[in-house]
Image: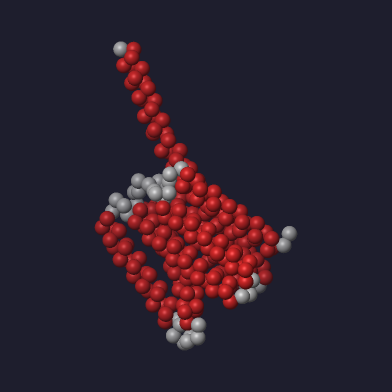
Amino acid sequence: MSGKVVSDVFSYLGYTLEVCLFVYLVARGHARRLWEIVLYLAMSLGVAGARSYTLHLYGFSSIKYYYSYWITDFLLVFTAFTVVVFLFRRACAQHPEMWRHLRLLLGVVFFVVTVISLLSLSNSKEQIYSLFIIQFSQNLYFACLVLNTLLYLLVLKTEIADDRLGLLVCGLGIEFAGPAAGLALIYLTRGAEIGRLVGVYLVPLCDIGMILTWFYAVSRTSEATKAPQSKVRASRILAEESATNF
C-alpha cells in the first residue's frame, strides 16, 4: 500500500470522526456550551469540502487550487486562534482580573503577528496579497501553538470548575503538534522523502488524536452530569416512599 493511500485513509477517517463528533455535540445539546469546538469542527469540515471540490474541479497544480488551499488555511488558522482566545476566557471565568490582562495580551499577539507578516514582505512586491496570507497563516499558527501551551499550563495551575477544559485544550494541542512536527522533520531532513512521508502521516494522525480526545472529554462530562441527576431521582423516590409509608 502506497504512502498516499495510507495518508488518504487516515485523512478520511479523521473527517468521519469530525462529522460524528459534530453530530454528537448537536444531537446531545452540547452545541451551545461548547460552541467553540462546534465552530472549529464546522470550519475544518468546510475547509476539507472546499479543497476537495477545488481539487476535483481544477487539479492539484492549478492556480485556483493554490489560492483555495491557502485562503482556507488562513480561515482555519484564524478560527483556531479564535477558539484559543475563548478557551482562555473559559479558563479565567472565575478570575475576571486575569482575563482583562490576558485579553490585552492576546490582542497584542495578534497585532505583532500581523506586523511581522507585513514586514517580511517588504522586499516582495509581486503577489503581495497571496504571500501575505501564506506568511500570516504560518505566523499565526505558530502563535496558536505557543498560546495553547500557555493555556494548558494555566489550566493546570488554576482551579477551574469545568473539568473538561483541560482535555479540550490537550486535544487542540495534539492538532497543532502535527503540522509543527511535520514541518520540523522536513526541515531537519532537508526535504528528504522519508521526512516528507512521516510529516504527511502525522497531520491526519494528530487530527484523529484530537477528535478522540474531545470525544472522551464530552462523553466523560455527559456521564458526570448524569450521575448527580440519578442521585437526585433516587433521593426523590426514597422521599416519596417514606412519605407514603408514614
At 42% across and 82% down in the image, what residue appears? 119
User: Where in the figure is residue 230, as x and y percent of width and height?
Assistant: 41, 30
**Residue 19 shown left or right of residue 99 in the figure:** right
Indicate whether 93 appears above or below 191: above
**Residue 60 falls in image quadrant:** bottom right
Q: Residue furthest front?
A: 57
Q: Residue furthest left?
A: 97
**Residue 191 shown left or right of residue 23 in the figure:** right
User: Where in the figure is residue 43, as x and y percent of width and height?
Assistant: 48, 60
At 41% across and 59% down in the image, what residue appears? 83
Q: Residue furthest top?
A: 246
User: Where in the figure is residue 172, as x and y percent of width and height?
Assistant: 47, 57
Indicate whether 31 appears above or below 224: below
At 73% across and 59% down in the image, what residue appears? 1
Viewer-proximal residue, 14 or 167? Answer: 14
At 45% across and 73% down in the image, what residue appears? 136
Indicate whether 246 appears above or below 10: above
Q: Is residue 213 visible?
A: no
User: Where in the figure is residue 130, as x and y percent of width and height?
Assistant: 50, 78
Q: Residue furthest right?
A: 1
Viewer-proximal residue, 130 or 102? Answer: 130
**Residue 193 falls in image quadrant:** bottom right
**Residue 4 falls in image quadrant:** bottom right
